[in-house]
Amino acid sequence: MVPRVADGSVMVREYRRRVISEEVASLRRDYEAEGLVESEMAAEPYSEFERWFRGAAEAGIEQPNAFVLATVDGDGTVSARALLMKDFDRSGLTFFTGLGSTKSRALENHPRAAATFVWLDLHRQVRFQGSVERVADSVADEYFATRPRGAQLAAHSSNQSEVVADRAVLDQRFREYEAEFEGVEVPRPDHWGGWRLVPDVVEFWQGQPDRFHDRVRYRSDSTSWVKERLAP
């Protein structure tokens, strides 16, 4: 029963902290899934990720290309945000964003990043670490042309991560660009482009019973990939 005291009291704050803690603890689940066997996994991480990604898509995972990107600013501040992967091949994973955004400024100053895909329904995650490079303008142009028109106009209307007075400012910009490009194709704005994360470490994580999870890491030694098991 909640103590009948003022909301700001120490007793109520402690009660709420305890209830929230108990609710989080009750979310524990035992993972029942086939484990990872190193000898059955691909010799390099690209093929293995493609197999896992295809499995996530076939399992009906919503937006299996969603991942969390972590970056480091010049002063050492760490930031993370959710993005959508738009391409993946042997050169790495590609995403697009505003080139003046917080993430892009961080990548310009410290061109390394980490990306994590989490597929909770499959009790799986894949972690990438590596260097980051800008994709060619031609690649950004090609992808931008496939975006819905509204998303194209939004890219023109937003200097990503800048402070704005209110939503009305953004809506006004959108209307202005909507009028400017009426009846014509919307070109890619100079402040919008793409990045590619080139991994040198990729970890595959599979949930197992008793929190005794399987972790297999691929590590590049510059000439080949070393596959090794990590303790959970």
Image (spheres, rainbow, N blue to C red):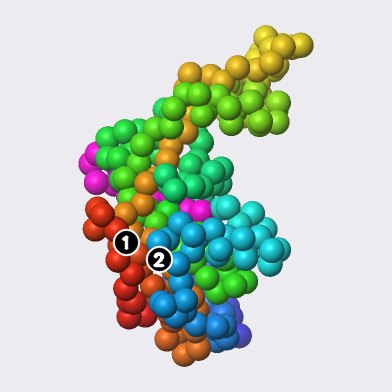
Q: Position of residue 106 (x, y in %)?
A: 33, 38
Closer to us: 25 or 35: 35
Say which residue label 2 marks: 43
Identify the mark nearer the N-term, 1 or 2.
2
Q: Is residue 55 above or below residue 72?
A: below
Q: Quarter of the image containing the N terminus?
A: bottom right
Say which residue label 1 marks: 225
Q: Secondary structure at mark 1?
A: strand
Q: Is residue 170 above or below residue 11?
A: above
Q: Which region of the structure is painted magenta? A: 67-78
Closer to us: 230 or 160: 230
What's the residue type where badge 1 is placed? Answer: Trp
Q: Position of residue 127 (x, y in %)?
A: 42, 61
Q: Position of residue 90 (x, y in %)?
A: 44, 48
Q: Is residue 146 above or below residue 20?
A: above
Q: Quarter of the image containing the C terminus?
A: bottom left
